[in-house]
Amino acid sequence: MKPVFLHRLYTFYRDGFKNMTVGKTLWILVLIKLFIMFAVLKVFFFPDFLNSRFDSNESKADYVQQELLRVNQ
Amino acid sequence: MEILSSLVDWSRAQFAMTAMYHWLFVPLTLGLGVIMSVMETLYVKTGNEQWKRAAKFWMTLFGINFAVGVATGLILEFEFGTNWSNYSWFVGDIFGAPLAIEGVVAFFMEATFISIMFFGWKRVSKKFHLASTWLTVTGATISALWILVANAWMQYPAGTTFNPETVRNEMTDFWSVLFSPVAMNKFFHTVISAWVLGSIFVIGISSWFLLKKRQADFALKSIRIATVFGLLSSIILLITGHGSAYHVAQRQPMKLAVMEGLYHGKAKADLLAFGILNPSKTFCNTEDELLLSIPVPIPGLLSWLGYDDCNAFVPGISDILNGGYELQNGQTALSFEEKQRRGKEAIQFLSDFRQAATAGDTEAKATAKAGLEENYDYFGYGYINKAEDLIPNVPLVFYSFHIMVILGMYFIAFFLVAGILVYRKKFENVRWLQKLAVWTIPLAYIAGQAGWIVAEVGRYPWAIQEVLPLNAAVSKISTGSVQLTFFLFLALFTVLLVAELGILTRQIKKGPEAEVN
């Protein structure tokens, strides 16, 4: 890629973000939302159930099969 | 079992809340996106600056809605991994592949072109900007396609084979998953319903400007576009609605029976325009199904919608549970007890297969695999204890369906009247219609949510139709943790919704004269 193109791309985004009005509020809202979702909810409240308990696909398959048989009891 | 039900109920409630909240934003993005793109196309074609102003105003509202709604769907994926881990494992790559394509292709397409759409008005050519606007909307629509393909697979699991070695379903035919008739119809029905909502939103907000005696030219221009687009979309929605009824009748007959409150099947069945359910009616008693029934005056309409034949037999709830009626393919429908027996056999064969695999007994493995394959279509019935457990919440599905249909008919009449008046240049003088247009906005949201209730509550108790019920799909976690996150989400969603409504209202009040980015 030519440096001129990269510079134009950079100024395109730089000026775009600089001239935002309502967009600034929206970006703040988006960033707060993403922080809550990924840094709080995902980490503390939504661990992946199988990945957090088992290392291999075989042990996950065994567990799910046992669960499917247990629920059927 | 009571604890499990409670866990299943809370997990369902959490998933439903997240999905319904997400669906507040998606339809407006899809619907408004097309309308603003049409306006910008008119600007590029005619050079009329008023179309540019209109396109920019609706684009700002599109941006607000997009920003608040973006990534809320990801929470559903968190819930799959935590609350529905058996399900997540069981569906394997079938769910993963469409969602991955959605994340990589469609999202990046949207993300690339949305910045050109908002930042590029003075930086790129008119035509390149227009292309970016259309590509942003196309990206959003393709995102919806992959999500709906994944959802359709749960309603009609096509193009896959269950592998007992891995206890997972594996995709054997990508094109069957993508182009399954259920997926295609679901995509068009859902996206076009979003176009209807977008049209109603534009007419409603434009009418607000007329009521306030502001921006009359802009408002009437917007209404002209939205009434034509909305009317065409509503008519196509009727056709895809017929498609939905047909696929439900073929593959989820219980859902169709519950939608119509039909306990006892009949040939040449009429479609109810409206009815009131008898709250005392259950599967076990002989009371009347309905306290009030007002059928659509077209004989055999339900039979025609479900089977393309006005004389076809539409099975009721009791027929589906008892079996014994003739299916469309000429076979006799199995009773619940027979399906349950075959489901339990399938589960036992899975257990036998795994034991044989561990013992290295190749012959026993092959026998178990053959038995599992023969009975796999009934696998999920092995987890159902009694016939009544197969009946979804009848009042919720019945009333949601009829509210959706009644509102759909109202929208057609609304677009027709509004369109005639706006093209005869009389709309600006009819204040009652302007007020009605504003109040029609929430009705469009109610119709969309009601449609999802029919689709999702109507397929109870299945996470995957007839293969995996909810009680087998759920993770073994504490009910308390699901309750906690339910209320956390409720708080987060409420705050976000209030924020969106606040920003949106402020921006609408500023009107198209405000130059924003």
Image: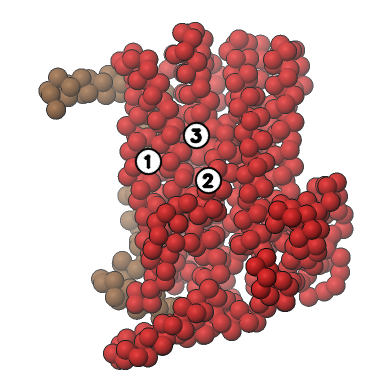
Chain colours: A brown, B red
Whichever of callouts 1 and 3 sits on the residue coming sooner in the sequence is 3
Q: Amino acid at mark 2?
A: Phe
Image-quadrant location for residue B257? bottom right
Say which element carries label 2.
helix
The answer to whether residue B382 is left or right of residue B108 is right
Q: At 50% from the left edge and 79% from the top edge, which residue is drawn?
A: B374
Say which element carries label 1.
helix
> Dot 2 corresponds to which residue?
B187
> Dot 3 corresponds to which residue?
B29
Q: At 52% from the left edge and 70% from the top edge, which residue is drawn?
A: B467
Please state the chain letter of the residue tagged with numbered disc 3 in the rendered image: B
**Relative to A69, does residue B283 appear above or below in the rendering?**
above
**Relative to B504, does residue B479 appear above or below in the rendering?**
below
Q: At 58% from the left edge and 13% from the top edge, which residue is drawn?
A: B218
Depth check, front residue: B517 or B161: B161
Verify CB contact (< 8 Å) between mark 2 and mark 3: no
For label 2, count other residues whose C-alpha is less than 10 Å away and answer few (under 14), some (14-19) or many (20+).
many
Whichever of callouts 2 and 1 sits on the residue coming sooner in the sequence is 1
> Dot 1 corresponds to which residue?
B106
Location of the N terminus of chain A by quadrant is top left
The answer to whether residue B292 is left or right of residue B2 is right
